[in-house]
Image (cartoon, rainbow, N blue to C red):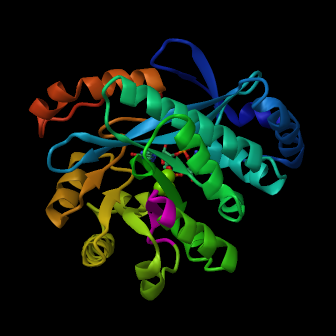
Amino acid sequence: GHASTAMRCVKLAGGGDYMVFEPRMAVDTRDQAELLHDLRHAVANGELELFYQPKIDAQSLQITAAEALLRWHHPLRGLVSPGIFIPIAERYGLIGTIGQWVIDEASRQAADWRASGLRMRVAINISAYQMRQHDLVDRLVAALKTHGLQPGRFTCEITESLAMEDTRVTQRSFERMRRAGLHVSIDDFGVGQASLSYLRRLPAAELKIDGSFVRDLATSADARSIVDAVVKLAHALQLRVVAEGVETEAQRDLLVTMGCDELQGFLFARPMTARALTLWALDDGQRTTMKHDFRPSLFQETVP
Ligand code: C2E
Ligand code: MG
Ligand code: MG
Ligand code: MG
């Protein structure tokens, strides 16, 4: 039926066949209801997993952080993209449980990596619901404390549009993040309507340029001007700039020339399992000697 045409079979680097259910494919109402039903049990059934995608220092090419990206291994549908199930979870009140699972799992993994001598930050994506929870920061601090982690080594990625909400409750979350010393990143920057004065008041240390601008860099003078302006703006506000969605060497070279501090994208690595990222990160020495001769990593999530 509808659902099966919306699924595609792809080969994962590991070998097995996976169905990937993607956001750009239509999800009809019956699908939604089914997914919602199944999602209620996903955490308890151990069907969620965090994949990690590295952020790379543009100069040293060292790994600076690993961004946790949620994956749902649906027993029948295979891999369901967060672009599909996060909005459902958000809408039907499941994001609280899922968000807490992400906090615990990412903290545990961060502690694991520290114990193996890997010093990159771990970043998680914070949903709108979580940002409005009055005890979000208490939960974050508690998880970090359990695992003996410094708050500054943990990044909270908050989208620009959510950050700009500027309501009492989101302001309070930001204020508590500042006091707790968490590393705050403004995600998907450029697509929302950031007010510069408000941006200056946020406790952010990092700005992530939205992938849509990066995608058009080599072909659009407008995209180049926007990225150039965002880099200058961020630096004027003492923020580090990360470009997401870097796929080509041409994009990488332009971003480096414009002074972008960190890069993230399929050119360097796709989101991958924690184990694969451990190997990738330990291989740092080899990668940095390759310098400007990047090759796609062996440890890659499959392109649909
Ligand atoms: P995001 O935080 O902006 O993450 C970047 C997305 O772009 C990820 O998609 C990533 O796999 C993808 N990406 C990375 N490099 C490239 C590239 O070079 N080219 C292209 N075309 N795409 C690239 P993903 O994993 O499907 O996640 C989509 C969104 O779902 C995320 O956007 C984030 O907003 C949300 N999300 C993922 N995990 C979580 C989570 O644990 N909690 C919450 N609240 N949201 C999450
Ligand atoms: Mg993100
Ligand atoms: Mg992003
Ligand atoms: Mg994005």
Q: Is residue 17 visible?
A: yes
Q: How many marks?
A: 0
Q: Quadrant of residue 236?
A: bottom left
Query: Which quadrant is home to the N terminus?
Result: top right
Q: Is residue 298 visible?
A: no
Residue at (18% x, 66% y) in the render: 258
In the rendered image of this protein, does residue 61 appear above or below residue 178?
above
User: Which residue, as the protein is rendered here, is positioned at the far bottom?
Assistant: 197
Q: Position of residue 141 (x, y in %)?
A: 57, 49
Left or right of residue 244, residue 260 in this image: left
In the rendered image of this protein, does residue 124 appear above or below residue 77?
below
Residue 105 within the magenta-colored segment of the rendering: no
Residue 190 within the magenta-colored segment of the rendering: yes
Q: Position of residue 25 (x, y in %)?
A: 68, 45
Q: Position of residue 260 (x, y in %)?
A: 24, 61
Decide which of 213, 149 is in the foreground and name it. 149
Left or right of residue 189, residue 130 in this image: right
Decide which of 279, 300 is in the foreground and name it. 279
User: Which residue, as the protein is rendered here, is positioned at the far top?
Assistant: 15
Q: Which residues are magenta?
A: 179-191
Left or right of residue 106, residue 114 in this image: left
Left or right of residue 43, residue 13 in this image: left
Residue at (27% x, 70% y) in the render: 231
In the rendered image of this protein, does residue 163 appear above or below residue 71?
below
Residue at (52% x, 74% y) in the render: 192
Q: Position of residue 224 (x, y in %)?
A: 27, 70
Residue at (71% x, 63% y) in the render: 134
